[in-house]
Structures are given as C-alpha cells and as structure tokens.
Image: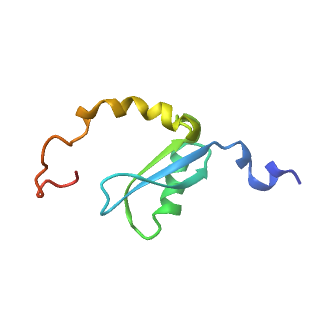
Amino acid sequence: MSGEARDGGKRDWPLYEVFVRGKRGLNHVHVGSLHAADDRMALTHARDLYTRRNEGVSIWVVRSEHIAASTRDEKDPFFAPSADKVYRHPTFYDIPDDVPHI
C-alpha cells in the first residue's frame, strides 16, 4: 500500500503554521503546525487541535511557504542598521509607571 493511499493524500497537503491568541493574551503566539487540504480545513483542524480547552479567542493559519524569515546566519548583518538609530529607542525620556504594555 503506498503512502498516499494510507494517509489519504496528506503528503500533498500544504503545511500550515498555527498562531493562537489566548483570552488573556495581547498577541498571537505560534503554537504548532499542521497539514490541511485548504485554508478552511486548516482553520477547523487548528481549532480542534490547539484550542480544545476553550483557551483561544482568535486563530491565524498561514501556509508555511508564504512566511519569509531571516536566518540565524543573518542575525548580525541583518539587524546591525538599527543599532545606529538611537532615537528609535525610548532611552531619552521617562515612561510613567501607569502606562500599560510598554
């Protein structure tokens, strides 16, 4: 029996990355990956797999092939230009203690 016959053709299904925002969270967090035939199936499977305990309020699924990322080898040269722009960092003024999320 071929691999395709055993898994229903899942080897051809694209890989999706799953991001969930929890009830107490402010941003989406990567929680895992899954294979699905299309976007709707990816959302449904992500809901079933990663929010079983009713902890999520929002789910994003993104095809892995659409994610562009820097590599570990690019770390220093890629981020070096931001080091010479000190005005981008909040070091020149005081932030009040009652300002949330900074």
Q: Please state the horizontal and vertical placement of residue 71, each as a whole percent of the image.
A: 56, 38
* In the depicted structure, whether residue 75 falls above or below residue 56: above
Residue at 43%, 71% (x, y): give it.
53
Task: Give residue 90's quadrant in the image.
Answer: top left
Q: Please state the horizontal and vertical placement of residue 34, each as a whole percent of the image.
A: 59, 52
Residue at 25%, 39% (x, y): give it.
89
Q: Please state the horizontal and vertical placement of residue 11, each as a whole percent of the image.
A: 73, 46
**Label tally:** 0
Q: Nearer the viewer, residue 85 or 68?
A: 85
Task: Give residue 29's quadrant in the image.
Answer: bottom left
Left or right of residue 59, residue 68 in this image: right
Q: Residue furthest right?
A: 1
Is the image coloured rainbow, by chain, by secondary structure, or in one colour? rainbow
Residue at 57%, 52% (x, y): give it.
33
* In the depicted structure, whether residue 52 falls above or below residue 93: below
Residue at 49%, 62% (x, y): give it.
50
Q: Please state the horizontal and vertical placement of residue 24, each as a whole percent of the image.
A: 30, 63
Q: Nearer the viewer, residue 62 or 101?
A: 101
Left or right of residue 102, residue 21 in this image: right
Q: Nearer the viewer, residue 8 or 20?
A: 20
Figure quadrant of the N terminus: bottom right
